[in-house]
Amino acid sequence: MTTLLSFLFVLGVLVFVHELGHYLVARWYGVRVITFSLGFGPKIARVTRGGTEYCLSLIPLGGYVKLAGETVQEDRQGAPDEFLSKSRWVRFQVYMAGPVMNILLAIVVLAGVLANGADVPAYLTSPPVVGSVVEDSPAAAAGLQPGDRVLSVDGRDVYTWESLELEIATKAEREVTMLVDRAGQHVSVRMTPSAVGRYDQGSIGILPVLRPQIMQVNPGTPAERAGLQPGDVLLAVEGEEGLSQQEVIERIRASANRALAVTVERSGSPLTLTVTPEGSEGAGVIGVSISPYETRRIDPGIGEAFVMSLERNWESTLLIGRTLRGLFTTETPVRQLMGPVAIAELSGSAAQAGWVALFNLMAILSLNLGLLNLMPVPVLDGGHIAILAVEGIARRDLSLRVKERILTLGALMIVLLMVTVIFNDISRLLR
């Protein structure tokens, strides 16, 4: 039930905002709006105000705004409040309004999410230096080694772990060429990322250099008495450096009732403290919560959050553009496309994680919806805009027959896309 409700909430907001854009601009220019519908198919609730029917329809996978005199097939009267009676410039603005509203929603919602603050993994913004290589992974087979610094993937420079992960994510089962810096020497390696997870994300099996960090210190525990604090980064236990979270825990468990020298980094400086785990032999505890990786707190103000939102949405826009281009060049696997079932699953998972995760997902989906609608595909807003552009350049309207063929082609493309994403969804469920 949580999955269904969260899916309907997210989709309902996205569709409402999109159609509201068309509605507001149309009304602004005096176009008569006949119907404003959330959903398609049979109408289950309706109300008429000011000559416009506002309704909720049975199939919740979209919505529409029906304008007077919107198509040449209609029995038009040539009235000034009909859509086709308006100039191409006005019609262009009406078509653009829906996608623009979705993009603005993405910016505003993500700014709100960012303004809430978060603890983010520090390694994501660090240079992509290999900390360890998973056995029997594509990276291991290609000969990547700890200490290698990844410089580029298929000729695209990567400066952080986050950018590296984004490059690899869309390359599942597609051979890539990586350039790495190994002790000052540039080495080129080839490998084919594995498809992992339900959404077939590319993975090559490398991990960053991870430094465990103390996230919480319980009061009245050995850790508190020793002076350990939340935020301390664990550098060494008994002089042994480079330990993982699990290795640190094992050292603590094995040292019950024995003094243990723990070296941490606090405010950029190393500090060695002595803590004595309590408990039975092999089950020592010091009363802390340890994260497997170092985090940093981000608490931007409203203005800074909006700037960060603009930057992240722009980066996402570039990534979406590359992904769409990759579908035509076969660089992006078609099976990574997600349909309504996958989006519903993501909505349910995000809702269970909390409102921040749910609204973050909403921002991502809203940006995708806005950009996809701007594609020059007939039936979509971008297709209508493309036709307007052609007519503007030709300085005459396309014939009814040509427009019908264009729209039919667009409808077939949309049906093919829907069949593909639904097939992907079913395949994931079966897996």
Image (cartoon, helix red, strand yellow):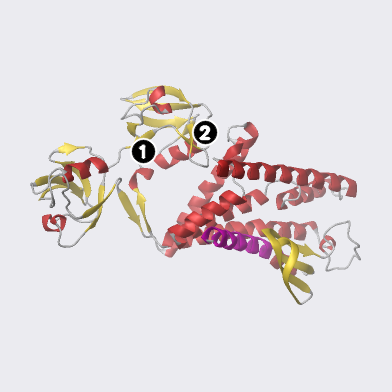
Write down the region rendered in magenta: 2-22
Residue found at x 71% / y 50%: 382
Q: Nearer the viewer, residue 250 or 75?
A: 250
Q: Is residue 234 above or below residue 67?
A: above
Q: Residue flagged by tag 1: what amino acid is it?
A: Pro
Residue 430 locus on image (x, y percent): 57, 42
Residue beneath label 2, please?
172
Q: Residue flagged by tag 2: what amino acid is it?
A: Ala
Residue found at x 32% / y 25%: 184
In the rendering, which numbered label is found on residue 417? none
Q: Nearer the viewer, residue 180 or 342?
A: 342
Asked which quadrant contains residue 211, the reply is: top left
Q: Nearer the viewer, mark 1 or mark 2?
A: 2
The quarter of the rendered structure image containing the N terminus is bottom right
Please say whether residue 28 is visible from this viewpoint. no
**Predominant SS of the magenta segment:** helix
Q: Residue furthest bottom?
A: 50
Q: Is residue 350 left or right of residue 378?
A: left
Contact? badges 1 and 2 (CB < 8 Å):
no
Residue found at x 78% / y 48%: 387
Q: Is residue 193 left or right of residue 183?
A: right
Q: Is residue 107 above or below residue 162?
A: below
Residue 63 locus on image (x, y percent): 70, 60
Please say whether residue 208 is visible from this viewpoint. yes
Q: Is residue 368 left or right of residue 259?
A: right
Q: Name the element at disc 2.
A: loop
Residue beneath label 1, please?
127
Q: CA distance from mark 1 to mark 2?
A: 22 Å
The quarter of the rendered structure image containing the C terminus is top right
Residue found at x 30% / y 41%: 210
